[in-house]
Amino acid sequence: MVGKIVLGTRGSELARAQARLVEKAIRDAHPHITIETRIIATKGDKAKVIDPRAGRKGLFTAEIERALLAEEVDIAVHSAKDVPSETSPGAEIAAVLPRAPMDDVLVSKHRGGLACLPQGATVATGSVRRRHQLLWKRADLKLINLRGNVPTRLRKLAENEWDAIVLAHAGLERLGLSPSRTEFSLKGRQFFLEILPRETFLPAGGQGIVALQIRVGDQNTKALVDLVNDPETLLCLQAERQFLRSLQGDCNCPVGVLAKIEDGKMKMRAQIFAGGTATPREASVQSAPEDGAKLAVELLRMIEQEHEQE
């Protein structure tokens, strides 16, 4: 077993929090190891403006993956939903932490959640998927682009004449802003939280998962990350990523996909907004957990079949 490990991560507050979770998990499993964390600036961190139509493939992961392949770090720590479905052949997602809540959360200046936002309310989000889901249920909304880390997004909500923003439940929780609270104050403003229904706001593939990427063939690091891996979460992530590969879509594509293991079965559901339609095509399937790759292909076949019948 290795005596020292170097983690590579982005420098945002959330990314650092996730790296600390990985460090704690490794230290709990291997108390005498030395762990160093190296902050790596990504293209997404450096860019002043990101056009949401251009997509996010590798924006927040490519530089960290390059540092991994150059052996500058031993483990790349990513938010799994940011990792493109096709990665370098020299790197692999070898382990994941247990999945945090994967839902989306509406942070609003109004009580009552999405249904009670004023007619024509302004909602900010940087996600193409969330834009489609919001307009599916509230076609009257005015949507604007939003980027920045979680604290920055909350500050922008406080400082602008917006009505609400949408964030990931997991990110809020990892920063100590648990959505189990229904309201909180920031910069003298009161904000109200609603966990959005998963039936409509199906999450992005990998949402809520911290992924540990290593070099292919690095058996020492593989043995280390195996100690902290959550096998069921990894199976679910692999199935979701297979669906995205089959679709040739990533987080810039208006698609939600979620795999869960319950009662010994993997249940998988997807939602695709295609061809400019306001209503998504949806399907769900279930099978044995070890058949996740086949399940993903079957799920896409069902959605395509639904499209042919329209």
Image (cartoon, grey):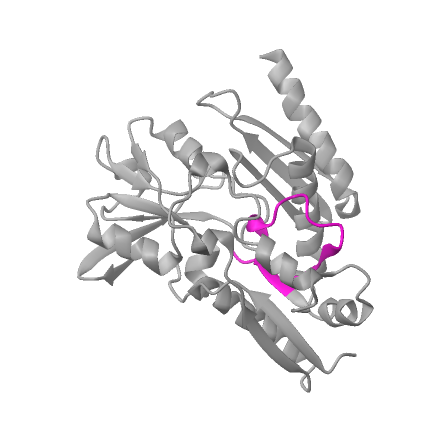
Q: Residue at x 65, y 69 (%)?
A: 72
Q: Find residue 82 and report its horizontal and vertical position in percent.
A: 55, 50
User: Closer to the camera, 215 or 105?
Assistant: 215
Which of the image's four quarters has the C terminus? Answer: top right
Give the residue drawn at x 54%, y 54%. Answer: 208
Left or right of residue 294: residue 178? left
Q: Position of residue 303 (x, y in %)?
A: 63, 25
Q: Quadrant of the N terminus?
A: bottom right
State whether residue 213 appears in this view: yes
Query: Residue 18 at what x, y percent from top left?
Result: 53, 66
Whether residue 230 is visible to the viewer of this picture, yes or no, is: no
257 sits left or right of 192 in the view: right
Task: Please determine whether, in this image, residue 304 is positioned above or below residue 153.
Answer: above
Does 81 appear in magenta?
A: yes
Q: Is residue 208 magenta?
A: no
User: Which stretch did the figure color magenta?
Assistant: 76-101
Which residue lies most toward the top here?
Answer: 309
Residue appearing at x 65%, y 32% in the figure: 247
Residue 49, compared with residue 301, is above or below; it is: below
On the rendered structure, is 221 left or right of 45? right
